[in-house]
C-alpha cells in the first residue's frame, strides 16, 4: 500500500452539504440564511451585540480586588539569618544584607532552614515555627509595632 492509496473507512466521513446549488438540493437560493439582514449578507463576529456596548467591554478589565490598605511582607527564612554574623538583626541589617527589598515596609520571619547561633531578631511578624527555632537556639524575638491609620472622627455639621 502506498501513501496515495490511503482512504478513510467507508461511511466514516460524511460529504459536506453543498449550499446554494439550486432549489432541488434543499439548500438552494438563500442557502439556509433566511431572507435579508446582516447575517444573510455577510459575517457577524461572535460577540457582536447589535451595536450595544459588548459585554466584554462592559465588564472591568482586571480581575479581583486589591484592598487599599493591604500589608505586604518581605519574607526572610531562619536559615538565611545563620549566614549573617550578627548578634542583633533588625530591618536595617536585613536590608543592608540584601535579604529584604527596599520596597518591603514590613518584614516577616519564616521557618525555612535551621539556626544554631544565639540571635536577637526584630521584625514586624514571625511565624510560630520560626519563633520556636530561634528561641530553641537560645535567641529572642522582638516584634516591632505596626502603626495603624487612625480614622477621622465625624465632625458635627454647623
Image (cartoon, rainbow, N blue to C red):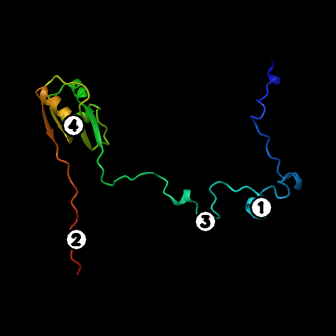
- Residue 125: x and y, percent? 21, 41
Alpha carbon distance from label 3 to label 1: 24 Å
Q: Mark 2 or mark 1, which is nearer to you?
A: 1
Q: In this picture, is 98 found above or below 32?
A: above
Q: In this picture, is 132 found above or below 156?
A: above
Label whose residue precedes the other's in the sequence (1 or 4): 1
Label whose residue precedes the other's in the sequence (3 or 4): 3
Alpha carbon distance from label 2 to label 3: 43 Å
Alpha carbon distance from label 3 to label 4: 53 Å
Choose between 1 and 24: the one closer to the eye: 24
Residue that numbered label 1 is attached to: 34
Choose between 88 and 3: the one closer to the eye: 3
Residue that numbered label 3 is attached to: 52
- Residue 24: x and y, percent? 89, 53
Label whose residue precedes the other's in the sequence (2 or 4): 4
Alpha carbon distance from label 2 to label 1: 66 Å
Left or right: 150, with 42 as reference point:
left
Residue that numbered label 2 is attached to: 154
Left or right: 51, with 8 as reference point:
left
Labels 2 and 1 touching (C-beta < 8 A): no
The residue lying furthest to the top in this view is: 1
The reply to whether residue 22 is in sight is: no
Labels 1 and 4 touching (C-beta < 8 A): no
Classify mark 3: residues with Cα within 10 Å, few (<14), some (14-19) or many (20+).
few
Query: What is the secondary structure assignment of the residue under circle 1?
Result: loop
Q: Mark 1 or mark 4, which is nearer to you?
A: 1
Residue that numbered label 4 is attached to: 127
Classify mark 4: residues with Cα within 10 Å, few (<14), some (14-19) or many (20+).
few
Amino acid at each position: 500500500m502506498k501513501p496515495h492509496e490511503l482512504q478513510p473507512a467507508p461511511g466514516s466521513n460524511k460529504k459536506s452539504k453543498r449550499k446554494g446549488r439550486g432549489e432541488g438540493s434543499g439548500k438552494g437560493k438563500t442557502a439556509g440564511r433566511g431572507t435579508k439582514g446582516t447575517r444573510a449578507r455577510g459575517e457577524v463576529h461572535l460577540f457582536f451585540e447589535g451595536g450595544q456596548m459588548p459585554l466584554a467591554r462592559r465588564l472591568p478589565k482586571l480581575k479581583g480586588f486589591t484592598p487599599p490598605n493591604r500589608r505586604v511582607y518581605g519574607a526572610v527564612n531562619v536559615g538565611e539569618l545563620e549566614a549573617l554574623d550578627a548578634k542583633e538583626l533588625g530591618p536595617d541589617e536585613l536590608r543592608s544584607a540584601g535579604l529584604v527589598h527596599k520596597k518591603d515596609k514590613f518584614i516577616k520571619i519564616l521557618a525555612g532552614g535551621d539556626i544554631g547561633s544565639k540571635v536577637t531578631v526584630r521584625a514586624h511578624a514571625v511565624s510560630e515555627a520560626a519563633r520556636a527555632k530561634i528561641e530553641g537556639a537560645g535567641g529572642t524575638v522582638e516584634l516591632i509595632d505596626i502603626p495603624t491609620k487612625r480614622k477621622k472622627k465625624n465632625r458635627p455639621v454647623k
